[in-house]
Image (cartoon, helix red, strand yellow):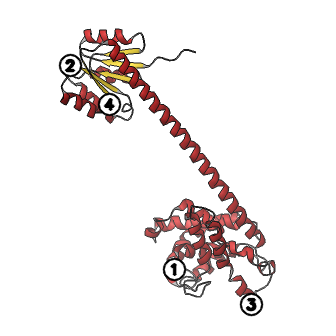
């Protein structure tokens, strides 16, 4: 199989010089010529050269000015430039090299030396391109692998969360619904400029999926308590109240197995604080007001709403209107007043989610 010839554009306003240069290059390269920088730029719209040989002293736009245009253009800046000129003083050569040229050749030159230097620079450019392509391919593989690992982690975490919900008498729809409730509520907070400074620091790609683990501690609670059709006794409720801290301990163990702590940091906050209440009567820590992390205050609304509109062993589902009314009555008692105000604006979307993703 024949190897494709490299392409060179030679630029010189002197036709005699240009013809001589073309005759030297023609046996080894595909050569295009231009008698001015303007004609070179026109040629570049049709030809993608591997190298440009550029005269310095030309009318209108000289070689240095043409090189500046080339290096400022993303499409052309990687093309190697060799100046071929009769300006054979050190300052001129330094100027040419500082403009990004790979070489500076004085006129008159010998054909063999010119060809050798062109060959060398084309080989360097080829090696750089191969290295760049190799790095790009490796980076693509690395990114693909990273996403595969993230997908695997997400799948494992989803399965763990599904198991918890299955034991709680749900089908796992609670996980999907609460995540979507959170998304709508957060979007509305941003739109209404409520707690927007804090929300702007969150990484949503980690925060929203981490909400799946908010009830992971229930995996350690007995079926007798989880699936009890009637009201829990005081002793049983005390056992139920241990599930946030059991969840935190489980998340801590998961976190120790990975270097990426962002996901588990959000998950820990959701697990620990989603049963805290605005008036301080919640659990496990009895936090009050804005001492409760914003993530927990948000999940409190999403979690309670979904519990209200869903069937449970101890109750039938409430209609969305009743669930909304109950949360509104909890304003300033169980729930952050500002979050309740935002919730009321998106309660129709909550109702739609609960309907579409019903168990």
Query: Which residue, given by chain and number where applicable, does mark 2 sit on?
Result: 86
Q: Compared to 152, does 176 lie above or below?
A: below
Q: Compared to 359, does 88 lie above or below?
A: above
The Cα–Cα distance between marks 2 and 1, rounded to whole angstroms, is 80 Å
The Cα–Cα distance between marks 4 and 2, rounded to whole angstroms, is 22 Å
Residue 124, visible in the rendered structure = yes
Disc sitting over residue 70 in the figure: 4
Mark nearest the camera among 4 and 1 is 4
Query: Which residue, given by chain and number where applicable, does mark 1 sit on?
Result: 337
Mark nearest the camera among 1 and 3 is 3
Q: Residues within 10 Å of mark 1 (few under 14, many from 20)?
A: some
- Residue 356: name its quadrant: bottom right
Q: Residues within 10 Å of mark 2 (few under 14, many from 20)?
A: some
Q: Residues within 10 Å of mark 3 (few under 14, many from 20)?
A: few
| Mark 4 or mark 3: whose residue is earlier in sequence | 4
| Mark 2 or mark 3: whose residue is earlier in sequence | 2
Count of marks placed on residues: 4
Q: Does residue 42 appear left or right of residue 60 in this picture?
A: right
The Cα–Cα distance between marks 4 and 1, rounded to whole angstroms, is 60 Å
Q: Does residue 144 appear left or right of residue 337 in this picture?
A: right
| Mark 4 or mark 2: whose residue is earlier in sequence | 4
Disc sitting over residue 235 in the figure: 3
The residue at the point 48 percent across, 67 percent down is 199
The Cα–Cα distance between marks 4 and 3, rounded to whole angstroms, is 79 Å
Q: In this view of the protein, which residue sits in the foreground, 276 or 155?
A: 155
| Badge 3 element | helix
| Mark 2 or mark 1: whose residue is earlier in sequence | 2
Q: Does residue 23 appear left or right of residue 240 in this picture?
A: left
| Residue situated furthest bottom in the rendering | 234
């Amino acid at each position: 199989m024949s190897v494709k010839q490299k392409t060179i554009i030679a630029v010189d306003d002197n036709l005699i010089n240009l013809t001589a240069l073309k005759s030297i290059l023609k046996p080894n390269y595909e050569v295009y010529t231009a008698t001015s920088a303007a004609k070179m730029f026109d040629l570049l719209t049709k030809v993608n050269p591997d190298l440009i040989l550029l005269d310095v002293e030309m009318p209108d736009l000289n070689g240095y000015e043409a090189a500046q245009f080339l290096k400022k253009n993303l499409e052309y800046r990687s093309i190697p430039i060799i100046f071929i000129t009769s300006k054979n003083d050190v300052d001129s050569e330094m100027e040419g090299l500082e403009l990004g040229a790979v070489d500076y050749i004085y006129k008159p030159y010998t054909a063999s030396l010119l060809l050798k230097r062109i060959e060398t620079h084309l080989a360097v450019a080829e090696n750089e391109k191969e290295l760049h392509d190799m790095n790009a391919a490796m980076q693509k593989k690395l990114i693909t692998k990273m996403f595969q690992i993230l997908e695997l982690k997400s799948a494992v975490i989803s399965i763990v969360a599904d198991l918890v919900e299955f034991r709680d008498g749900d089908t796992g729809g609670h996980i999907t619904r609460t995540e979507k409730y959170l998304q709508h509520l957060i979007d509305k907070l941003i739109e209404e400029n409520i707690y927007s400074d804090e929300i702007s620091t969150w990484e949503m790609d980690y925060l929203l999926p981490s909400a799946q683990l908010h009830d992971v501690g229930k995996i350690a609670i007995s079926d007798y308590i989880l699936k009890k059709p009637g009201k829990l006794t005081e002793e049983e409720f005390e056992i139920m109240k241990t599930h946030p801290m059991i969840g935190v301990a489980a998340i801590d163990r998961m976190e120790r197995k990975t270097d990426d702590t962002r996901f588990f940091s959000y998950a820990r906050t959701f697990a620990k604080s989603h049963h805290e209440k605005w008036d301080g009567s919640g659990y496990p820590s009895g936090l009050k007001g804005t001492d409760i992390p914003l993530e927990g205050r948000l999940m409190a609304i999403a979690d309670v709403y979904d519990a209200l509109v869903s069937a449970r062993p101890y109750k039938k589902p409430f209609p969305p209107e009743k669930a909304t009314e109950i949360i509104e009555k909890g304003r300033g008692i169980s729930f952050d007043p500002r979050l309740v105000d935002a919730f009321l604006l998106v309660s129709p979307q909550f109702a739609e989610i609960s309907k579409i993703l019903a168990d």
